[in-house]
């Protein structure tokens, strides 16, 4: 009988996620951890789908392990974090908080995790959850699923000229949120 490799068994999805986040500047890491905790509190039954893509780290929150059913996601870049609504184009947005012109998704840049508590963003989250294709589980605790990890990645910390030059080449937030970025 073979014993499990300690390095493999110790790499739980939560540990892998922490390793992904450690690549970022500490300020971005704190913003993501706090924003994630607020979203987790708001959606305790959500399943977190994590994509450590070429351009960004994406964390989708949804009722299942299907990316197409995610309601919102955090898209983590070296200098900012977006709160992305996968069906944001159809959400009422009287405060005009959402950016983007795609046929489905919209996003807002989080200056701080407290932005999630702003009435306008709270209303957007409520609307997104109400119009979700499947309701989130109310009672069971959600869990993390590492969906993909890109072997090659752009720098996760700001500062290089090459990265600044290539920022305009980043994929849309929807591509990142759905794991296609």
Image: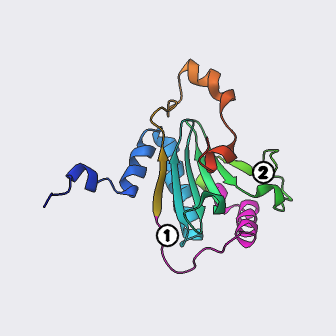
Looking at the rendered structure, the secondary structure element under dot 1 is loop
User: What is the x, y in percent for residue 128?
Assistant: 73, 65
Q: Tell me the CA gap for discs 1 and 2.
A: 27 Å
For image coordinates 15% across by 58% down, the residue present is: 3
Q: Are marks 1 and 2 in contact (CB under 8 Å)?
A: no
User: Which disc is residue 12 wearing?
Assistant: none
Q: Nearer the viewer, residue 36 or 34?
A: 36
Is 71 in front, or is 178?
178
Q: Is residue 52 visible?
A: yes
Q: Which residue is mark 2?
A: 98
Q: Is residue 107 left or right of residue 94?
A: left
- The quarter of the picture where the C terminus appears is top right
The picture quadrant where one finds residue 131 is bottom right
Position of residue 88 measured from the top left corner of the image (x, y, whole percent): 77, 56
Which residue reaches farthest right?
Answer: 94
List x then y, in percent, for residue 178. 63, 50
Residue placed furthest toward the left: 1
For disc 1, the neighbor class at 10 Å (few under 14, some 14 to 19, many from 20) is many
Left or right: residue 60 compared with residue 30: right
Would residue 166 appear left or right of 124 to someone viewing this image?
left
User: How dense is the environment of label 2, judged by Cα within 10 Å: few (below 14), some, or many (20 and up)?
Assistant: many
Residue drawn at x 24%, y 49% as measured from the top left? 7
Determine if the magenta segment contains residue 118.
yes
Residue 23 to residue 90: above or below: above
For label 2, the SS is loop
Relative placement, left or right, of 88 versus 10 is: right
Residue, disc 1: 142
Q: Nearer the viewer, mark 1 or mark 2?
A: 1
């Amino acid at each position: 009988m073979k014993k499990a490799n300690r390095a493999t068994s110790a790499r739980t999805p939560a540990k892998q996620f922490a390793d992904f986040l450690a690549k970022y500047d500490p300020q971005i890491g704190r913003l993501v951890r706090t924003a994630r905790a607020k979203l987790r509190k708001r959606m305790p039954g959500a399943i977190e789908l994590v994509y450590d893509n070429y351009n960004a780290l994406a964390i989708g929150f949804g009722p299942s392990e299907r990316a197409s059913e995610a309601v919102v996601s955090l898209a983590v870049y070296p200098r900012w974090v977006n709160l992305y609504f996968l069906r944001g184009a159809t959400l009422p947005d009287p405060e005009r908080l959402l950016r983007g012109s795609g046929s489905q998704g919209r996003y807002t840049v989080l200056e701080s995790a407290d932005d999630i508590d702003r009435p306008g963003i709270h209303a957007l989250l409520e609307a997104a959850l109400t119009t979700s294709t499947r309701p989130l589980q109310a009672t069971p605790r959600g869990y993390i699923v590492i969906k993909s990890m890109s072997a090659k990645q752009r720098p996760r910390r700001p500062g290089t000229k090459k990265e600044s030059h290539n920022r305009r080449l980043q994929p849309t937030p929807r591509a990142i949120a759905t794991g296609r970025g």
